[in-house]
Image (cartoon, rainbow, N blue to C red):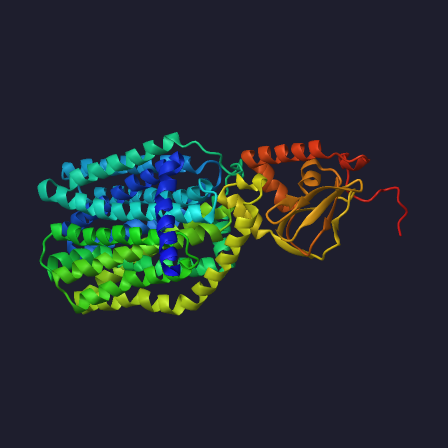
Amino acid sequence: MGDAGGRGARLRDAAAAFTSNACNADLRRAQLSFLGAWTAEWAFTVALGIVAYRDGGAAAVGLVGLLRMVPAALLAPLLSPIADRGRRERVLILVSTARGIATAAAAVAAAVSGPPAVVYALAVLSTIAATLFRPAHSALLPSLCHSGHELASANVVRGLLDSAATLVGPLLAAVLLSFTGVSVVFGVAAGSSLWAAALLLRLDYDAPPRPAAPQRPQLVKEAADGLRAVARSRDLSLILGLAAAQSLTRGALTVLSVVVAIELLDTGESGVGTLMTAVGVGAVLGSLAASLLVGTSRLGSWFAVGVALWGLPLTLVGLVPHELAALLMLAFIGVGNALIDVAGFTLLGRLAPDEVLARVFGVLESLVAVFIGIGAVVASAVIEVWGTRAALIAIGLLCPVLAVLSWPRLRVLDQAVGVRDHDVALLQRVPMLRALPLPSIEQLARGLEPVAVAAGQVVFSQGDVGDRYYVIESGRADVVGDGQVVATLGPGEGFGEIALLRRTRRTATVVAREDLRLQGLRTDRFLPVVLGYIPSAREAATVVDVMLDRYSPLDASAEPIVDPAPDPMEEPS
C-alpha cells in the first residue's frame, strides 16, 4: 500500500506540474515564448550546418560552430546584468526581436545565393541574441513562482517544451529541406523568434524589488559580481562545471551528427535532421518522465544521471554504428537533456541570490557557448586524426566519468536543499509571507537564525527595542500585554513584526508556554524583503492593523522610536 501511495503522490505531483503552468497566465505565456525561441534555434542550427558542410565539409561545420559561440560567450556575462535590473521580460522581447531580424536577413542572403560569409556573420548576431534569452528567461521564472515545488514544476514544463523544440525544430528543418531549401528554414525560424517576442508583451505580474539601472552602467563590474557569486559557492561551481562538460559534448554532436549521417550511416543530408529528431523524441519522453521528479529531494543525483546520459550513448554509437542503434542511442541523449533541464536549472535558480541571478545564468550561457564551440572544433580535429568511430567513443566517455566523480558532492547538495525546503515551507505558513515570490522567500530562508527558548522564559518584553522577527517552528508561546494573555501562538505563526514595521518598541511580552524552537530574522533581512514587495507589504500592514485593533498597550511602548541609540544625556560609565 505504501508503494502504491508513493506512486500515486508522484503522479499527482507530475500532473500538478503541468496544470499549475496552464492555469498561471504569465507562466503559460513565458513558457510558450521559450518554445518559439528554441524551435527557431534548433531549426536554424540544422540549416546552418548544411550551409557550412556544403561550403567546406566537416571542418567548416566545426569552424562555424566556433565562430557562432565565441562572441556570444564573451558578451553573455557582460550583457546579462541588464536582466538583473527592472523587468526581465523586456530583455526577452528585445533579444527575440533582434534574433528574428537577423535570422530573416540570413534567409534573404541564402535565397539570393549570397556569400556564405554573410550567412555566418548573421548567424553570429542571431546566436548572441539567443545566448541572452535563456539567462533572462531562467531568471524570470522564479519571480513567477511561489515555492520550490512550483519552480521545479515550471522547469519540468520548460524542459518538456525545450525537448519539443529539439524535436520539432530539426524535424521541421528536415521536412523543409526535403522540399525547399535552407532559405525557407531560416525564414520559418525568424517567424518563430518574432512570435516568442510577441507573447511576452502581455505579461502582468508583481516583480520583486531590484536595483535601478545606474546612471553610468558598469557592465564589466556587474558581470564580475556574477562570477564572484559562482566562485564563492562550491555547489554553483560544480553545477556549472558539469554543464560545461555537457556543452562540449553538445558542440561535438553538432559536427558528429552531420558526419555520422552522411559518411558513417550514408543517410544523406536529411539524415542529419533525422538523427537530431531522435534526440528530440528522447527529450520529450524524458521530460514526461522527469515530471515525476517535481517532489523529489534528489535533484543533484538526477542531474548527474542526465550529464552521464549526454555522453554514454555516443560511445555506444561508435561501438555499434548502425542506423537503428544510432537513433535509439541518440534518444537517450534527449532523456539526459530533459533531466539536466529540470534538475540543473531548478538548483541554479535556488542556490543563486536573486539580485545576481541573471548574471549567474549569464555565466552559464557563456560557458555553454564557449564549450559548444570548443566541442565542435575538438570533434572535427579528432575525426581528422582518429576517424569518426574513435571520436564518438572518446568524446562520449567525458561526461559519464565526470558524473561519477561528482556524485558524492551532489548527494550532499541534495541534503542542503532539503533543509532549505523545510525553512521555506515554514515561512510560507505565515500569511504575511505567503504572497512573496520564491526568490524573496528564499532570501528570507537564507537569513534564518535558530533560537531555542525554554518553557517559562521570556523571548522579549513589552517596551524592548525590536531587532528581530520570529516564526515558531515548534512549541507554543503566550503574548502578554499589560499583564494579561492576549493571544497564544503555535507552530507556523510569527510575531514581532509590529515593532519592526512601525519602528516602535515591543507592544507586548512573549513568554514560552512550552519549550520553543524559533527561527529569527534580523531587521535588516526582514524589512527590505517584506516592504519591497507590494503584496506582502500590503498584507503586513493589514496584519499589524488587525493586531493593534485587538490589543493596544496602555503605556508609551507604541510610540515611534526616533533614535534607537543610547540617550546622549546619560552619564558615560
Question: 102 left or right of 206?
Answer: left
Q: Position of residue 390 (x, y in %)?
A: 20, 69
User: Which of these two is toward me, 157 or 566?
Assistant: 157
Q: Residue furthest right?
A: 571
195 or 375: nearer the viewer: 195
Report the front residue among 205 and 11.
Answer: 11
The residue lying at 88 percent from left, 42 percent from top is 569
Q: Position of residue 30 (x, y in %)?
A: 36, 38
Q: Is residue 418 above or below residue 129?
A: below
Quick check: 300 above or below 44?
Answer: below
Can you say which quadrant of the picture contains the N terminus? bottom left
Q: Residue at x 23, y 36 (%)?
A: 105
How far across and down, in percent of the image, does residue 133 sit? 36, 42
The residue positioned farthest toward the top in the image shown: 202
Q: Is residue 175 visible to the viewer in this orientation of the structure? A: yes
Quarter of the rendering containing residue 246: bottom left
| Rendered location of residue 355, percent (x, y) | 51, 45
Q: Nearer the viewer, residue 513 or 227?
A: 513
Judge from the rendering whether residue 181 lies leftward or rightward of residue 360; answer left or right: left
Position of 401 relative to 56 (above/below): below
Count of numbered marks: 0
Relative placement, left or right, of 561 versus 399 is: right
Answer whether residue 368 is visible to the viewer in this image.
no
